[in-house]
Image (spheres, rainbow, N blue to C red):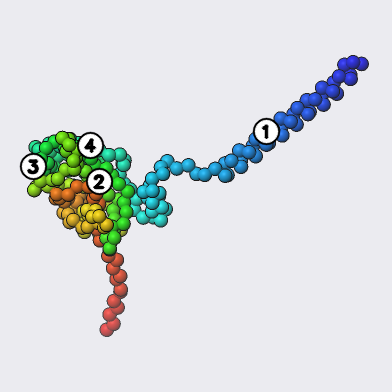
């Protein structure tokens, strides 16, 4: 008789425990759902330039094409030197006297932006800066300056007339055309300059032509 009276009591207790566990699991699931909906989206960067680049990409504009935005460094002396930045398709040629003493140069890819006027920007924006090792002052290039050659991807320039590509230099308030030589067969654009700091490559928009059929009647 004792065993017959004990079994219903155990079943009742198990039922209550199961209900409590189920209720707890349900509350936890609801809590996670609410947190997931209310949590803000995480961002890998808080940089304003990255936000602008993301916005341009959503609008279908030309985005960055660099393999990386990490800076690249080189030590340059008075002797001629060809600095091949292979990961970015850029070659900088230094001549005799381009710098007056040993200096550090830094190449940093940047996010593309508007060039103003009627020019169409390409994904190729970058900084090229130099500082002398002796006192960390900014490099002033010699009379021969330097040559910058950039290899571009024609597939990324669907809105630009490649024959009009040229370099631009950043002035205090605007981008200034600097010219350049385009090799359409090699897909390169080259310029000689005595400037450093911010550069960009851009060109004229592709001209759209409308062809009308002509019907001749005898």
Quadrant including the N terminus: top right
Marks 2 and 3 sit apart, C-alpha to C-alpha, by: 21 Å
Neighbour class for label 2 at 10 Å: few (<14), some, many (≥20)? some
Mark found first going from the N terminus, 4 or 3: 4
Mark found first going from the N terminus, 2 or 1: 1
Q: Secondary structure at mark 3?
A: loop
Residue 167 location, x and y as percent?
A: 21, 53
The residue drawn where x is 21% and y is 58% is 177
Judged by depth in the image, the label closer to the viewer, 1 or 4, is: 4
Residue 68 placement: quadrant: top left
Residue 36 placement: quadrant: top right
Residue 131 or residue 204, whichever sits in front: 131
Tag 4–tag 2 contact (CB < 8 Å): no
Marks 4 and 2 sit apart, C-alpha to C-alpha, by: 12 Å
Lateral position of residue 15 relative to residue 192, left or right: right
Is residue 130 visible to us here?
yes
Q: Secondary structure at mark 2?
A: strand
Marks 2 and 1 sit apart, C-alpha to C-alpha, by: 56 Å
Is residue 151 visible to us here?
no
Q: Which residue is mark 3?
A: 97
Q: Secondary structure at mark 1?
A: helix
Marks 3 and 1 sit apart, C-alpha to C-alpha, by: 75 Å
Residue 187 or residue 178, whichever sits in front: 178
The residue drawn where x is 87% and y is 16% is 3
Q: Which residue is mark 4?
A: 73
Residue 69 location, x and y as percent?
A: 31, 42
Tag 2–tag 1 contact (CB < 8 Å): no
Q: Which residue is mark 2?
A: 127
Marks 1 and 4 sit apart, C-alpha to C-alpha, by: 56 Å
Neighbour class for label 1 at 10 Å: few (<14), some, many (≥20)? few
The residue drawn where x is 27% and y is 57% is 173
């Amino acid at each position: 008789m004792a065993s017959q009276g004990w079994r219903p009591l155990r079943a009742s207790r198990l039922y209550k425990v199961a209900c409590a566990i189920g209720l707890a699991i349900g509350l936890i699931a609801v809590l996670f759902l609410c947190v997931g909906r209310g949590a803000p989206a995480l961002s890998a960067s808080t940089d304003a330039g990255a936000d602008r680049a993301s916005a341009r990409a959503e609008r279908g504009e030309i985005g960055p094409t660099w393999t990386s935005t990490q800076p690249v460094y080189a030590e340059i002396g008075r002797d001629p030197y060809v600095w091949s930045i292979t990961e970015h398709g850029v070659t900088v040629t230094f001549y005799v006297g381009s710098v007056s003493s040993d200096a550090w140069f830094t190449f940093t890819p940047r996010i593309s932006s508007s060039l103003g006027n009627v020019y169409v920007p390409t994904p190729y924006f970058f900084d090229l800066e130099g500082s002398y090792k002796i006192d960390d002052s900014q490099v002033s290039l010699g009379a021969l300056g330097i040559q910058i050659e950039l290899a571009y991807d024609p597939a990324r320039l669907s809105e630009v007339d490649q024959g009009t590509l040229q370099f631009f230099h950043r002035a205090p308030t605007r981008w200034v055309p600097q010219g350049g030589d385009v090799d359409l067969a090699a897909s390169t654009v080259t310029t000689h300059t005595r400037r450093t700091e911010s550069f960009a490559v851009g060109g004229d928009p592709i001209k759209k032509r409308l062809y009308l059929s002509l019907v001749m009647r005898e």
